[in-house]
């Protein structure tokens, strides 16, 4: 809460405390929203029942048990009846006499967004005057006039107070409505918990950050909603917030494996405000950008060295060829052949370095995992000894995913060959694929070899580290790691009870549906828009067009049948294709971006991590590859 909000809240509380009547406002979850000091004093309530979030049921039970409603045989039934009436609240007015002789009037009004406001007025003096008038009217003609005048003055004061209360109610209603509207518009889960960790407020976004969670969470404990594992992750930060800190942290949610950023802010009254955001895509993009930066640094360092080294190898091999043409002793001829072999191996190593530091971006296309794994079986089986078995278990999604099939297949073949070397002449290699909460595609290659050594677990992903001696380049796992990080994924090495395992996690991105349906084309250059429209029509789409993000957003909001969006990155106006991604509705069609920007442009790199990107110019076949894996040649 900012300083302005705090000031407004204090002013509102001060104003309510000046009112002679007792006032309380409860929300539609039967929790106290606000009350004044007179309300607490009138019913002698403890602090916890006069604090926002206090339970209506507990308050009603406390007042009943104190005898304020007189003798009640079954308090539980009495409380339940009043709760049922509150849940179906209607405007009302009645008067009742309390055991202490005080007479109060009770007026209740429902609020537009749910809940109600109740005003309690002490009318004991008015009732005494009425009684006096009834019993002594013939004796008090003079006093009658005076009392009548006093009663009229009292009524005028009461009317003034009622008007003030109505204005206060209106302002409170408007303030709450604006606050709630603001929190509902935020792309985050906003909530408040009291000192016991119980939710007292929430917007409706919890399921967007923590999928498959119950949205009715007010009055329930944080652990019950998040689960033991996630709550244990956030508990240290929550305890720190209770002590006055304002921690901001990230963690991976256990059920969905999505990355969540959380900010805790103490409210200075024992509770904590919570802001939670799903930053999975942001994290994937950040990891990918970090890897691109590392690759550029590596390329700058190695390209010059590789060029000079390549020239040296060329000179060495040329000299050895001249020596080989001479008449040499057998021992010298063997040395020449060994030198040539070493130089050729150095040349292969240079090619591997060039592949690792090249600027070729990932080229995701619609890929069916079953097809990719079937091809992997064919490619890998031929290189396995007779005694080494290969099992491939596919539990991944049936719909095609956006993956760089060539790079991924190369990575899996590399891992299978490493597993083969670990098994020797006999053993078992298993490749498994499955989804994790529509957030990750997880692939694992495990073997029955001796497992990773401690040094390998620590250094195996570093370039040039190898346990194969002169037979290994030390670039295999490093190149797999590079591919995974460029995609915004994760890679993990580990040992199992029977051997070693390598686990890859890649972002789970469904490919656009095969041609057909309605496509939204967003391109601000007329001649290009015409070309791309023809491509989409050739692929079986009906096409609608827009030239800006504003036009595209309006069409997406009005036409729920759009099944594909093809958008340029740079568009008319200030907004870009990346802004269009941010404005997509909650349930949105797949988006393909296109651009003519160089791969070194930061906007291009960011676009690549948010959606598949086609470089202009491209062909209908290249567009088709992103949409329909069956059309690949």
Image: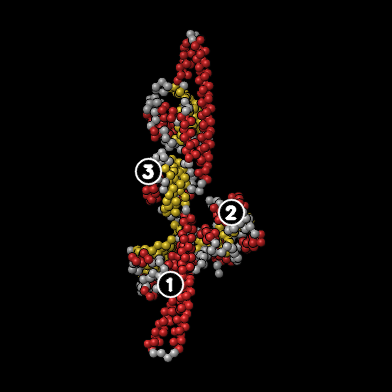
Who is closer to the viewer here, 480 or 272? 272
Q: Within 10 angstroms of label 1, few (less than 14), some, or many (20 or more) residues?
A: some
Name the residue: 51% across, 40% down.
179
* Earlier-in-chain disc, 1 versus 2: 1
Read off the residue under disc 3: 243
The secondary element bearing badge 1 is classed as helix
Q: Within 10 angstroms of label 3, few (less than 14), some, or many (20 or more) residues?
A: few
Q: Position of residue 542 (x, y in %)?
A: 63, 58
Q: Position of residue 193 (x, y in %)?
A: 42, 42
Who is closer to the viewer here, 548 or 256? 548
Name the residue: 46% across, 72% down.
305
Rounded to the nearest angstrom, the CA distance separating label 2 from label 3 is: 43 Å
* Earlier-in-chain disc, 3 versus 1: 3
Read off the residue under disc 1: 381
Name the residue: 38% across, 70% down.
466
Read off the residue under disc 2: 575
Q: Within 10 angstroms of label 2, few (less than 14), some, or many (20 or more) residues?
A: some
Q: How many marks?
A: 3
């Amino acid at each position: 809460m900012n300083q302005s909000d705090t000031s407004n809240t204090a002013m509102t509380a001060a104003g309510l405390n000046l009112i002679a009547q007792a006032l309380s406002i409860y929300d539609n979850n039967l929790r106290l929203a606000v009350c004044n000091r007179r309300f607490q004093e009138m019913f002698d309530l403890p602090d916890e029942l006069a604090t926002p979030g206090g339970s209506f049921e507990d308050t009603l039970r406390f007042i009943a048990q104190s005898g304020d409603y007189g003798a009640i045989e079954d308090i539980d039934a009495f409380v339940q009846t009043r709760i049922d009436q509150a849940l179906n609240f209607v405007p009302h007015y009645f008067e009742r006499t309390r055991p202490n002789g005080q007479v109060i009037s009770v007026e209740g009004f429902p609020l537009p967004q749910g809940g109600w406001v109740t005003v309690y007025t002490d009318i004991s003096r008015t009732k005494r005057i009425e009684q006096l008038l009834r019993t002594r009217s013939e004796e008090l003609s003079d006093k009658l006039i005076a009392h009548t005048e006093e009663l009229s003055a009292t009524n005028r004061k009461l009317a003034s107070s009622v008007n003030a209360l109505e204005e206060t109610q209106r302002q409170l209603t408007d303030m709450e409505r604006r606050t709630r509207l603001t929190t509902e518009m935020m792309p985050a889960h906003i909530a408040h918990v009291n000192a016991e960790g119980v939710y007292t407020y929430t917007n409706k976004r919890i399921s967007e950050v923590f999928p498959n969670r119950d949205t009715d969470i007010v009055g329930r404990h944080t652990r019950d909603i998040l689960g033991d594992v996630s709550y244990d992750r956030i508990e240290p930060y929550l305890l720190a917030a209770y002590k006055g800190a304002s921690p901001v942290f990230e963690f991976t949610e256990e059920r969905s494996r999505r990355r969540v950023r959380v900010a805790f802010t103490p409210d200075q009254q024992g509770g904590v405000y919570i802001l939670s955001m799903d930053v999975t895509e942001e994290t994937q993009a950040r990891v990918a950008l970090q890897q691109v930066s590392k690759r550029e640094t590596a390329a700058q360092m190695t390209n010059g060295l590789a060029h000079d080294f390549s020239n040296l190898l060329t000179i060495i091999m040329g000299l050895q060829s001249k020596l080989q043409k001479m008449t040499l002793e057998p021992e010298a001829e063997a040395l020449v052949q060994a030198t040539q072999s070493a130089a050729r191996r150095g040349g292969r190593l240079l090619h591997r370095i060039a592949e690792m530091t090249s600027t070729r971006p990932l080229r995701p296309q619609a890929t069916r995992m079953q097809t990719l794994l079937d091809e992997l079986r064919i490619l890998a089986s031929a290189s396995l000894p007779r005694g080494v078995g290969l099992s491939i278990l596919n539990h991944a999604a049936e719909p095609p995913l956006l993956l760089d099939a060539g790079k991924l297949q190369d990575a899996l073949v590399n891992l299978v060959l490493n597993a083969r070397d670990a098994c020797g002449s006999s053993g078992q290699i298993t490749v498994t694929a499955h989804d994790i909460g529509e957030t990750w595609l997880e692939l694992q290659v495990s073997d029955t070899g001796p497992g990773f050594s401690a040094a390998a677990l620590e250094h195996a992903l570093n370039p040039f580290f190898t346990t194969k001696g002169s037979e290994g380049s030390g670039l295999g796992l490093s190149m797999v790691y590079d591919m995974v990080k460029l995609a915004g994924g994760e890679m993990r090495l580990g040992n199992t009870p029977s051997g070693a395992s390598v686990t890859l996690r890649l972002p789970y991105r469904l490919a656009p549906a095969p041609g057909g349906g309605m496509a939204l084309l967003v391109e601000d250059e007329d001649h290009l828009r015409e070309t791309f429209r023809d491509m989409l029509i050739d692929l079986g789409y009906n096409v609608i067009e827009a030239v800006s993000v504003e036009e595209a957003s309006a069409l997406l909001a009005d036409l729920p049948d759009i099944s594909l969006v093809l958008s340029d990155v740079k568009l008319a106006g200030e907004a870009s294709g990346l802004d269009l991604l941010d404005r997509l509705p909650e349930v949105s069609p797949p988006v393909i971006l296109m651009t003519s920007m160089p791969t070194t442009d930061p906007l291009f790199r960011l676009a690549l991590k948010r959606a598949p990107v086609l470089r202009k110019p491209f062909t209908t076949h290249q567009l088709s590859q992103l949409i329909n894996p069956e059309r690949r040649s």
